[in-house]
Each structure stands twice: as C-alpha cells, then as structure tokens.
Image (cartoon, grey):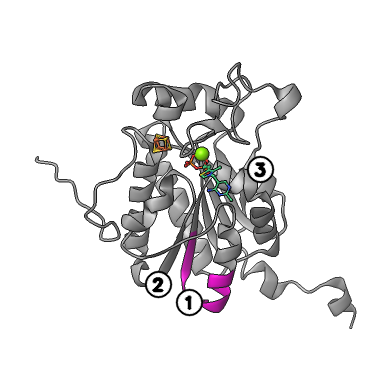
C-alpha cells in the first residue's frame, strides 16, 4: 500500500528550518496532531520560545506568540486568565525554561495555572551554538565545558519533571523521549493527556521530552538517538511522575484553606 504523508491541519505548508535529525521537527508534528485530534485549533494559543524553535509561528496554523527568553509561563498565565476558553501551550527549551526562566516555571506550576508546558530537553543551548544548559549531563562536552561538565563547579543536571511534580499546583508531570518510534508515539499520548488535563480545567500540566540536537552534540542523527537511549535516559528516567488528573476540579477552585474551613 502506498504511504502518503498527510500534513496535520494545524501545520502550515512550510519547510522546517531545523537541522536534519532535530527533535523540534518531530515535536512540532506531534503538537499539531494532538491539536487536530482534540479539535481545538481555533482556540489554541501557543508560545514560541527564544531558542531554535523561535520560528514556531511560521509552522503552526494556530495563534502563536513570541515571548522573551524564560518568560513564557508568565505570559501563558496572562493569556489563560484573560481568555479562559483558550487552550494555552507553552513550548520551551532547557535554556529558556530551566535557566533564565526557572523562577517563572516554578511559580506558574506552584500557582496551579491551568496551562500546558512542553519542555524540550536537548541538554544544550542549541540556538546560540551549543553552550552548557542546566540539563547538560555530567561529563558532557559543550562549547562552555570543553573538558566535559564538571559537577564540582557546574552542579548537577536539573531534573525538571521531578522538581515540578513536587509542587502542590502541578496536576500532571511526565518525561518522554524521541529515541524510537515507540517513544515518539508515547510522547504524543502524553501531550494529548496533558492538553486534556487543561481542557477539563484540572490545572498545571507538564511534559518533558528528551530531544536530539545532532548539530551541537556533534553526532549523526542515528548516534543522537543512541545517545538519548544510553546516556540521557539513564540520568533522566522516562515515566509519569505525577498524575492527579482523576481529581474532580482544579486545585485552586476546590480546596479550602484551614482558615476558611474554621469559619
Ligand atoms: C534575555 C536573553 N538572554 C539570552 C538570550 C540568548 N539566547 C537565545 S536562545 C538561548 C538559549 C536557547 O537554548 P534552549 O532554550 O535550550 O533552546 P534550544 O535552542 O536548545 O531549543 C539564549 C541563551 C536571549 N535571547 N535573551
Ligand atoms: S542546533 Fe540543535 S536544536 Fe537547533 S535546530 Fe539544530 S539540531 Fe535542532
Ligand atoms: Mg536546549
């Protein structure tokens, strides 16, 4: 049977600028397919990060805003609160979310904002030429850690999915990867679940994805997949770290403080 590439309605007919083998291309398609499947294209508002995915608005066929480095969760908060019927997707890299934007993501999650964050962990600052990110592995060579990341001076890689799952406001937190067709499909299922969490008004949802950057890792696309499977996934385990989507309503709407209850 002849296989035909069908472009999701939510992807424009434009050629990606990403390097061959880059995870962003796969993730854009996954996001678009989820939006199509859920029938939310008309009310989706995504945020393009500063990073290699900066031109996401050229590819997605729904509303996309470009937000300064690290600030997407703050902007997403404002959009969702002013347009509660929208479905807000914050698409962020590790330099954006886990370095300059650490404060924004932690407080948005802790407030239980009803938004969905897709976190692209490629362990490096891709756009600016391959500097160390907070998620760079111990011993990993980058342009700013030419002998490999030294934990004694640079600290440990940040495990954002685990970190955010420890916050009261987080309803759903998971990590997936793009190192095999099976895991690509699993990523799509997690994205859809996270978006449903928001659509049902449950609260903050977060999916981290281990994503390849062949260019700055200086590996072939095939070797990059292998690097994710053998090196990244060893330190960043895949799985669901928190799932409170079965709870009835959003955290902020239901639970009374001890002071209120005493009245
Ligand atoms: C306020 C601010 N500081 C620094 C930069 C420079 N800068 C642009 S992209 C980037 C890092 C991008 O890395 P990441 O978020 O991991 O995205 P990737 O390119 O890897 O997908 C940095 C530091 C900037 N644009 N704005
Ligand atoms: S530098 Fe890395 S993250 Fe950026 S487009 Fe190329 S492969 Fe993708
Ligand atoms: Mg990155």
- Classed neighbour count for the residue bearing mark 3: other residues with Cα under 10 Å, few (<14), some (14–19), many (≥20): some
| Horizontal and vertical percent position of residue 109 | 65, 58
Name the residue beneath numbered marker 1: 85
Q: Please determine whether, in this image, residue 244 is positioned above or below residue 214.
A: below
Q: In this view, does 162 lie to the left or right of 180?
A: right
| Residue 126 in sight from this viewpoint | yes
Q: Quadrant of residue 246?
A: bottom right
Name the residue beneath numbered marker 3: 162
CA distance separating discs 1 and 3: 29 Å
Total numbered labels: 3
- Classed neighbour count for the residue bearing mark 2: other residues with Cα under 10 Å, few (<14), some (14–19), many (≥20): some
Looking at the image, tell me whether mark 1 or mark 3 is earlier in sequence order: 1
Which residue is at 49% across, 68% downward?
199
> From the Cβ of disc 1, is ligand 1 less than 8 Å away?
no
Which residue is at 59% across, 33% downward?
236
Looking at the image, tell me whether mark 3 or mark 2 is earlier in sequence order: 2
Q: Ligand 2 appears in which quadrant?
A: top left
Quadrant of the rendering where the C terminus is positioned: bottom right
Image marks 2 and 1: residues in contact by CB distance under 8 Å: yes
Q: Give the range drawn in magenta.
A: 78-89
């Amino acid at each position: 049977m002849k296989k035909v590439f069908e472009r999701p309605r939510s992807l424009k007919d434009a050629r990606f600028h990403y390097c061959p083998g880059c995870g962003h291309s796969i993730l854009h398609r996954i996001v678009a397919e989820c939006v199509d499947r859920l029938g939310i294209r008309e009310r989706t508002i995504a945020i393009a990060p500063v990073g290699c995915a900066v031109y996401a608005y050229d590819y997605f066929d729904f509303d996309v805003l470009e937000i300064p480095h690290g600030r997407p969760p703050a902007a997403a908060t404002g959009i969702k609160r002013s347009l509660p019927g929208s479905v807000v997707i914050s698409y962020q890299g590790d330099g954006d979310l886990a370095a300059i934007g650490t404060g924004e993501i932690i407080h948005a999650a802790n407030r239980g904002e009803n938004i969905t964050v897709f976190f692209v962990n490629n362990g490096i600052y891709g756009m600016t030429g391959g500097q160390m990110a907070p998620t760079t592995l111990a011993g990993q060579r980058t342009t700013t850690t030419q002998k490999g990341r030294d934990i004694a001076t640079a600290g440990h890689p940040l495990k954002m999915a685990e970190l955010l799952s420890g916050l009261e406001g987080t309803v759903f937190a998971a990590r997936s990867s793009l190192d095999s067709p099976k895991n690509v499909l699993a990523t799509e299922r997690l994205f859809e679940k996270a978006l449903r969490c928001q659509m049902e008004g449950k609260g903050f949802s977060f999916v981290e994805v281990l994503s390849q950057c062949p260019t700055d890792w200086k590996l072939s696309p095939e070797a990059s997949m292998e690097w994710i499977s053998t090196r990244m996934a060893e330190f960043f385990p895949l799985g669901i770290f928190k799932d409170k989507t079965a709870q009835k309503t959003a955290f902020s709407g239901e639970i009374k403080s001890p002071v209120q209850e005493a009245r």
